[in-house]
Structure formats: structure tokens, C-alpha cells
Image (tube, rainbow, N blue to C red):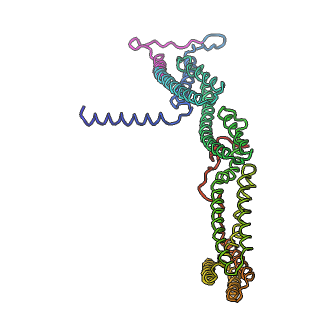
């Protein structure tokens, strides 16, 4: 054998090994092998043919009945045989039958071998299925006794075909084997479906465990976690345990339970961001306290110059004290009612910050009257530019233009008031307050037109709680009624 032949043989063997390995890795299914079905059909056809031939042989070998005429036997003419040539009639009839019987015997022997080869393939399918069942049992899947009974029934039928002789083969029923294999194929498909369900349950279980750990962390931080969240967690865990144990009566409940749990995810996300909300409230309180000190210095300086802003400062001081009380109340409320705590933070704390700072801005303007005109002009120019940008975006800016006109008019009044001698402090403060109100209204309208609004602290940052959802394929494996 030359080297090329050796390489070819080795290559074929190697490729064949890969094919076999790939085939072994593929999922199997129960099916009557073609060689088995063809062999059974061949044996059946041969049996019918042999019966027909046997019937024909009986008819050929029947003796000649003498014909009686008028009560007497008619004598058939006797033909003397040629002594040199033996009679050929009987042997000519028998020779085709003998040849045919020999051919049928050879075909039947080959068909019998094919039947046994096919039965061995079925036995191999059974071994694969038993290994699959054992793997599921190891995973904790409950295997019904009915499946094991069907396995034993098919084993018994297969063994009959493996041990049967040609004569015994005619008494075996292929339909019985076919039905038994169809039954086990249905069971195999059910196990495959259960395998997919189990895999999805493990994925859901992992998500649930993460979700539960995050909830427990919130509870340790003294957050008011709704009782329904813990209840829904318990229900989902029970449903998963039942499904894993093979109790599928209420398996479809998993869909609604997961949806209910996911609906609480938004609230859990807010609770998880409460610490950053408190941090922001603390930061703003410190800023107010710092501005309160600055304002006190400015008010004292102005008072020496005959400008009394003590009432404005008192209002600012009271507002800061009120904001601090709200911050503390919200911190306490989160342990009792999370919804109320967030409402307080949004409406009573952050929502009132502009009003609190209005007094501070008034004091700062009065402390440096000479900068009012330049600061006011800079702000109105910025607002005019925003209007131009919105116009390019085809947004109706008529109301904004009207508010800007009002602000400019009121700003001009303030400028005139600042020139008066003596200075009418109350009139200036009132006019500045009106300028502030117009400015807030302008900002609110821009937010309404653009959809850009200030985000609350709990609306910022990365998402911490992942969605609680099931695979879209679960509908195929657990049909809903």
C-alpha cells in the first residue's frame, strides 16, 4: 500500500470519527429504523407468496379423475414411454418451484438479519432514552412510573424481535412496536420540553435571588418596603419549586406572578436611590445655610447705610428652617411610608427651593445695586436666544415672547426705582419679586414646550433593579389557558 492510500484511509477514518461524534452529540428521537420496516415488509410479502405457491402446487399434484361414460370407465390411451428418454413432465414443474424456494429462503435469511439489526438500533435508542431519563432524575425532575413501564414494554417487544426465528417472526406484531415507540417519543418530547422549562426556571431563580438580596438590603436600611413585594417573592419561589418538582397543574401562574413582581420594580428602584436623594437634600441644606450667613453679612452692611432688609432676611431664615424640618421629616417618613416620603421630598423640599431662594436673591441684588442692570441684561439676552432656538425647531413661542416682554418692562421699572432718591426699599423688593416670578414662569413654559424638566435625584443614575420577565419561549413550553 502506497503512502497516498494510507493517507486517504486515515483521512476517511478521521472524518468518519468526526461525523460519528457529531451525530452522538445531536439529540435523538424514537423512530422505527427503515431497515427494520423494509425487512418486516419483505418477510410478510415472502410469506404471502409462499402460501400462494403452496396452493398452486396442491392443484398441480391432484390425481387425474377417470371420466365415466355410460357408467363405464373410459380408458385413456396408453403411450409407451421412450426407453431412451426418461419422463420430464414432473421434473419440469418442480424445478422452478425449487429455484424459487431457494431464492425466497435466501431473501428471508437476509431479511431476518435486517430485522435483528433494526431491533438492535431500537435497543440503542432505548439506551439513549434511559440515559436521558437518568440525567433528568439527577437534576431533580420527577419521572413518572408510567415512563419506566413504557420503557420496559418496548424492551420486551424488542427482545422478542432480537431472539425470534424466521417461523416465530410471523407471530410478532410490528404495529405494537410502532405504537410503543410513538408513546415513548411523546414522553421524550415532554422531557425535552421539561428540560427547557427547567433551564428557564433556573434563570428566573437567579434573577429572583438577586432581586430578593436587593430588597433585603433596603429593609436593612430601614426602608419601608411594601409587604406585597415580599409576598410576591414568596409566591414566585413556590411556583418555581412546584414546576421543578413536576407539579404542572398551576404552572401558568408563573406569568402573572412575574408580572406582579416586575410592577413593584419601579418602586424598589426609587427606594434604592433614596440615599442619593438624602445626599442631595443635605447638600442643598448646607448651601442654604451658607447663603444665609452671606445674606446676614449683607443685611448688616446695608443696615448701616440706612437700608433695612431685616424682614426679608427673617423670611429667608424662616424658609431655611422650614426646609430643614421637611428634610428631617422625609428621612423619618421613609421608614413608615415610602410614597409619602417621596411626595414630601418632591413637593415640599425641592418644589419650594425657588421660593426659598427668592429672598436670598433679593438681598444679593440690594447688596449690589450697581450690578442689577448688567445681570438683568445678560439673563434677558439668554432668554431671547432660547426663543430663537425654539423657533428654528418650529415650536410656538408666542407665550414666551410675551413673558420676555413683561420681564423687560418690569426690569426697567426696577432700574428706575433704584435711581430714586430717597430709595423706596419696599417698592424695589416688590418689583424684584415680580421679576423673579416672571422668570420662573418663563422657565416653566420652556420645560413644558420642550419636555425638558428638572429631574428628581431618584430619577438619575444607573438602573439597579433588573426587569423581572420570563423568556418569550416559555409560552411554547407552558401553554396558557
Q: Is residue 340 above or below residue 186?
A: below
The quarter of the rendered structure image containing the N terminus is: top left
Query: Foreground residue, 312 or 458?
Result: 312
Query: Foreground residue, 209 or 171?
Result: 209
Say left or right for 434 vs 371.
right
The total of numbered circles placed on residues is 0
Say left or right for 10 vs 46.
left
- Magenta region: 74-101
Query: Foreground residue, 68 or 92?
Result: 92
Say left or right for 138 vs 419.
left
Q: Position of residue 4 (x, y in %)?
A: 26, 37
Residue at 75 percent of width and 74 percent of height? 311
Query: Foreground residue, 421 or 159?
Result: 421
Would residue 159 be visible to someone looking at this image?
yes
Q: Position of residue 340 (x, y in %)?
A: 75, 55
The quarter of the rendered structure image containing the C terminus is: top right
Classify residue 180 by image quadrant.
top right
Residue at 65 percent of width and 59 percent of height? 282
Q: Position of residue 41 (x, y in %)?
A: 55, 28
Residue at 65 percent of width and 47 percent of height? 468
Q: Is residue 123 above or below residue 419?
A: above
Amino acid at each position: 500500500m502506497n503512502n497516498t492510500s494510507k493517507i486517504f484511509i486515515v483521512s476517511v477514518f478521521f472524518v468518519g470519527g468526526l461525523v460519528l461524534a457529531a451525530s452522538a452529540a445531536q439529540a435523538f428521537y424514537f423512530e422505527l429504523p427503515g431497515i427494520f420496516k423494509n425487512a418486516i415488509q419483505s418477510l410478510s410479502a415472502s410469506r404471502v407468496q409462499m402460501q400462494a405457491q403452496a396452493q398452486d402446487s396442491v392443484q398441480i399434484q391432484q390425481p387425474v379423475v377417470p371420466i365415466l361414460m355410460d357408467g363405464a370407465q373410459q380408458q385413456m390411451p396408453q403411450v409407451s414411454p421412450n426407453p431412451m428418454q426418461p419422463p420430464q413432465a414432473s421434473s419440469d414443474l418442480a424445478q422452478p418451484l425449487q429455484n424459487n424456494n431457494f431464492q425466497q429462503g435466501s431473501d428471508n435469511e437476509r431479511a431476518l438479519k435486517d430485522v435483528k439489526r433494526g431491533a438492535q438500533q431500537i435497543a440503542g435508542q432505548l439506551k439513549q432514552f434511559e440515559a436521558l431519563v437518568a440525567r433528568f432524575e439527577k437534576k431533580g425532575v420527577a419521572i413518572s412510573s408510567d415512563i419506566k413501564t413504557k420503557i420496559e414494554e418496548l424492551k420486551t417487544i424488542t427482545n422478542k424481535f432480537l431472539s425470534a426465528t424466521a417461523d416465530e417472526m410471523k407471530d410478532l406484531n410490528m404495529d405494537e412496536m410502532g405504537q410503543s415507540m410513538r408513546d415513548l417519543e411523546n414522553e421524550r418530547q415532554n422531557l425535552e420540553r421539561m428540560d427547557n422549562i427547567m433551564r428557564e426556571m433556573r434563570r428566573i431563580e437567579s434573577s429572583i435571588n438577586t432581586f430578593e438580596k436587593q430588597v433585603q438590603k433596603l429593609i436593612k436600611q430601614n426602608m419601608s418596603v411594601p409587604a406585597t413585594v415580599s409576598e410576591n417573592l414568596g409566591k414566585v419561589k413556590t411556583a418555581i419549586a412546584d414546576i421543578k418538582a413536576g407539579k404542572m397543574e398551576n404552572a401558568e401562574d408563573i406569568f402573572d406572578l412575574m408580572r406582579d413582581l416586575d410592577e413593584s420594580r419601579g418602586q424598589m428602584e426609587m427606594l434604592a436611590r433614596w440615599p442619593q436623594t438624602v445626599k442631595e437634600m443635605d447638600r442643598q441644606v448646607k448651601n442654604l445655610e451658607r447663603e444665609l450667613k452671606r445674606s446676614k453679612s449683607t443685611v448688616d452692611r446695608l443696615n448701616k447705610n440706612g437700608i433695612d432688609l431685616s424682614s426679608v432676611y427673617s423670611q429667608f431664615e424662616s424658609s431655611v428652617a422650614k426646609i430643614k424640618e421637611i428634610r428631617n421629616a422625609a428621612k423619618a417618613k421613609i421608614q413608615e411610608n415610602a410614597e409619602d416620603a417621596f411626595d414630601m421630598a418632591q413637593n415640599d423640599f425641592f418644589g419650594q427651593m425657588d421660593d426659598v431662594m427668592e429672598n436670598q436673591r433679593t438681598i444679593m441684588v440690594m447688596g449690589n445695586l450697581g450690578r442689577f442692570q448688567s445681570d438683568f441684561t445678560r439673563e434677558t439676552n439668554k432668554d431671547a436666544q432660547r426663543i430663537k432656538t425654539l423657533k428654528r425647531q418650529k415650536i410656538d413661542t408666542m407665550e414666551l415672547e410675551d413673558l420676555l416682554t413683561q420681564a423687560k418692562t418690569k426690569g426697567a421699572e426696577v432700574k428706575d426705582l433704584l435711581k430714586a432718591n430717597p430709595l423706596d426699599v419696599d417698592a424695589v423688593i416688590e418689583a424684584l419679586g415680580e421679576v423673579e416670578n416672571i422668570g420662573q414662569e418663563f422657565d416653566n413654559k420652556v420645560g413644558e414646550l420642550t419636555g425638558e424638566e428638572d429631574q428628581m435625584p431618584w430619577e438619575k443614575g444607573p438602573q439597579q433593579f433588573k426587569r423581572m420577565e420570563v423568556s418569550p419561549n416559555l409560552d411554547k413550553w407552558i401553554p396558557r389557558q
